C-alpha cells in the first residue's frame, strides 16, 4: 500500500487549503483514513479520521470546525479541507491508513506534505 | 483525552546495547497501544501493535510488553539503523493520542 499526499503550500493566516492523498496497492474502501501532522520540532498529532462509509468521522479539538476530512473511494483518494488556518497549523501533514482490526493502528503512512501558515 | 507519557525523552546508547522505552497512559487502554519508529525525512513506521504484536517485516529484536497503563518497547541488540525517534500511541478512544516521543541517539 502506498499513500501520496499533495497540496501543501505557504498560506497566509486565515486562509484555506485542500490537501489530497491518493492510495494505491489496495482498495481504499478497506481502510479507515486519517490525517496526522507534525509541527516543526514537535511530536506526532492525530487530527482526523473517516470511516469507509464516509459518515463516521472524528476530529481533534484543535481542528474541529475548521478542517473537514472527506474521501472518494472510486478515486482511492482522501482529502483534508483546511480553513481559518493559523500559525500553529504549520506542520508536515501525513495521510495514514488504518486497516480494519480489533486494535486499530496506523499501518501505512505517506511521506507527508508541508503546510506553512505565515504572513 | 488520554495522555501518554514516555520515558526517557532522549536516550544515548551504543550499537549492541539493549534499551527499553516506557510509555504510561493516564487511564487504562487495555492492550490498545501501538509503537512507531520515525526517522528524519521518512514516514513513521509501525513496529508493534496491540502492545506486543510485531508488525510484519519488523526485526525480532524489537519487542513490546504491558497492558492497562504501563507499556514498554525493548530493542535487544541495537543496530545502526535503529537510531531514530520512537512514539507510543493509544487507539482505545478518540482523540487518538501519541506520547511525546523518545529520541534514541548514538553514544
Image (cartoon, rainbow, N blue to C red):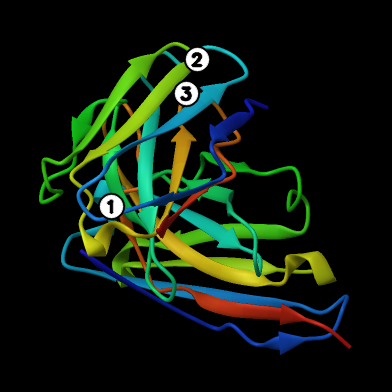
Judge left or right: residue A73 versus residue A33: left
Nearest the viewer among B86 and A112 is B86
| Left or right of residue B52, residue A97 in this image | right
- In what quadrant of the picture does the N terminus of chain A appear? bottom left
Which label was assigned to residue B14?
Answer: none
Quadrant where the image shows the C terminus of chain A: bottom right
Classify residue A88 by image quadrant: bottom right
The residue sitting at 23% across, 50% down in the picture is: B78
Decide if residue A102 is in sight here: no
Residue pointed to by mark 3: B92
Residue A115, given in percent of the width and then of the height, sits at 65, 78
Residue B38 pos. (x, y %) = 40, 59
Callout 2 and callout 1 share a chain: no
For disc 2, the neighbor class at 10 Å (few under 14, some 14 to 19, many from 20) is: some
Instruction: Give A30 or B57, whichever is nearer the viewer.
Output: B57
Mark 2 secondary-structure assignment: loop
Select label 1 or label 3 by which is in front. Answer: 3
Question: Mark 3, residues whose alpha carbon is within 10 Å: few (<14), some, or many (≥20)?
Answer: some
Label 1 belongs to which residue?
A29
Query: In the visual, does B16 lie left or right of B93?
Result: left
Picture coordinates of residue A58, whole percent (x, y): 59, 41
Element type at marker 1?
helix
Vertical position of residue A2 compared to residue B104: above or below: below
Eyeballing the image, is B27 above or below A92? above
- Counting residues from the start of the chain, the first of labels 2 and 3 encountered is 2
Where is mark 2, residue-wise?
A: B69
Label 2 with label 1: CB-CB less than 8 Å: no
Amino acid at each position: 500500500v502506498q499513500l501520496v499526499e499533495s497540496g501543501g503550500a505557504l498560506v497566509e493566516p486565515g486562509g484555506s487549503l485542500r490537501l489530497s492523498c491518493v492510495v494505491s496497492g489496495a482498495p481504499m474502501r478497506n481502510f479507515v483514513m486519517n490525517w496526522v501532522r507534525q509541527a516543526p520540532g514537535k511530536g506526532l498529532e492525530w487530527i482526523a479520521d473517516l470511516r469507509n462509509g464516509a459518515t463516521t468521522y472524528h476530529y481533534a479539538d484543535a481542528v474541529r470546525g475548521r478542517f473537514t476530512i472527506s474521501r472518494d473511494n472510486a478515486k482511492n483518494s482522501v482529502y483534508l479541507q483546511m480553513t481559518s488556518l493559523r500559525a500553529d497549523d504549520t506542520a508536515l501533514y501525513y495521510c495514514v491508513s488504518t486497516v480494519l482490526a480489533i486494535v486499530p493502528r496506523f499501518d501505512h503512512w505517506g511521506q507527508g506534505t508541508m503546510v506553512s501558515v505565515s504572513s | 483525552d488520554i495522555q501518554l507519557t514516555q520515558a526517557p525523552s532522549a536516550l544515548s546508547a551504543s550499537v549492541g546495547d539493549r534499551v527499553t522505552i516506557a510509555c504510561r497512559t493516564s487511564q487504562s487502554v487495555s492492550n490498545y497501544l501501538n509503537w512507531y519508529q520515525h526517522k528524519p525525512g521518512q514516514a513513521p513506521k509501525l513496529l508493534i501493535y496491540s502492545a506486543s504484536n510485531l508488525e510484519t517485516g519488523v526485526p525480532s529484536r524489537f519487542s513490546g510488553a504491558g497492558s492497562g497503563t504501563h507499556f514498554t518497547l525493548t530493542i535487544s541488540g541495537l543496530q545502526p539503523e535503529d537510531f531514530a525517534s520512537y512514539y507510543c500511541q493509544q487507539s482505545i478512544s478518540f482523540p487518538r493520542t501519541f506520547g511525546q516521543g523518545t529520541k534514541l541517539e548514538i553514544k
